[in-house]
Amino acid sequence: MDQPGRKLYQCEACAEVFLDPQYLECHQRQLPRPLEGPTGAPRPALELELGSRLKKLVDLGGGVVLRNCLIELRGSLRARTGLTFPAVRLCIDEGPPSNQWSLSFRRRRLIRGRLDDLQVERLQRQELCVSYYGAGLICAQLGEQLPQFFWRFLNRSELRDSLAELEVSDPELVEQSLSLLDQELLLRLLRLLVQERFSLNRLPALLEVLLEEHRLGRPLSPDRLVTPAVIEVMLES
């Protein structure tokens, strides 16, 4: 059962909610450095807008179940694709009663879904556990469709973070990549590859191929990004 009046503690960085401030402090100590967008401004959040008939997913427990389901989704997609999509802000559509929900990025709608009347009827119960049902329906669809939009989230900051993570295991590869490869062209190439569902978990193999191409006198150029060697790396993934 939901416990009205019980205080919740929310992480400002990722919106995860905790029942104990000690858990929040432990969580915050483990957070990576803040992500930034291309201009140095805070990275823009995705916005999940719920129709008014789905409002209970936000009202029950401060939306803790839905928020944590979204965080788990971010983690699973990160493991699969090597990319982390931005934090998600929850809001309610104050228009006419609706079963619909939509996910937008920079005010452009990416994904739209709808719960049928029987599913919404189940959400009207009082038990907090019902939130798992509604959150699961939404996150399952997001998990299927979000990867096709990941190229939109790949920016200079995400590339820097990926290289910083790789530097721990292979500092020489990262040093050579930073000194020899045009970073703007590398970002353009990665965005093209991510559109084709290339996983950034394969980034080390891609960098090695690009560095070899550079040694052979075939560096990255605006009109020659996707080479046969790059395609071979994609096929291996």
Image (cartoon, rainbow, N blue to C red):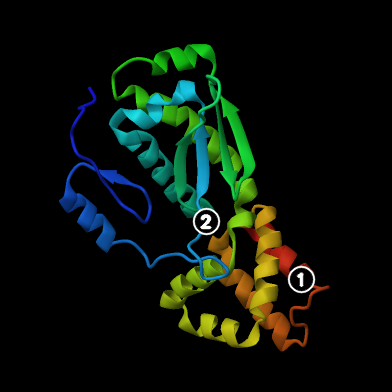
Q: Tell me where residue 194 appears, x and y as whole percent.
A: 65, 57
Looking at the rendered structure, which numbered label has been put on residue 39?
Answer: none
Q: Quadrant of the C terminus?
A: bottom right
Q: Which residue: 45% across, 64% down?
A: 35
For label 1, the residue is: 225
Left or right: 62 in relation to 174: left
Q: Which residue: 19% across, 39% down?
A: 7
Left or right: 149 in relation to 55: right
Q: Residues within 10 Å of mark 1 (few under 14, many from 20)?
A: some
Label 1 vs label 2, nearer the camera = 2
- Check the image and report above or below for 170 versus 199: below
Which amino acid does the dot numbered 1 rest on? Leu
Q: How many marks?
A: 2
Q: Tell me where residue 186 appears, x and y as whole percent.
A: 66, 73
Which amino acid does the dot numbered 2 rest on? Pro
- Check the image and report above or below for 190 versus 27: below
Mark closer to the chain start, 1 or 2? 2
Q: Secondary structure at mark 1?
A: loop
Q: Tell me where residue 29 appears, x and y as whole percent.
A: 25, 63
Left or right: 114 in relation to 62: right
Q: Quadrant of the N terminus?
A: top left
Quadrant housing residue 209: bottom right
Left or right: 208 in relation to 30: right
Q: Tell me where residue 41 appears, x and y as whole percent.
A: 51, 66
Q: Which residue: 56% across, 39% down?
A: 103
Q: Which residue: 72% across, 81% down?
A: 213
- The single residue placed furthest to the right in the displayed view is 223
Question: How far apart are the two marked residues, 1 and 2, measured between alpha carbons?
Answer: 28 Å
Task: Out of 111 and 192, give the one closest to the viewer.
Answer: 111
Q: Secondary structure at mark 2?
A: loop
For label 2, the residue is: 44
- Check the image and report above or below for 141 versus 126: below
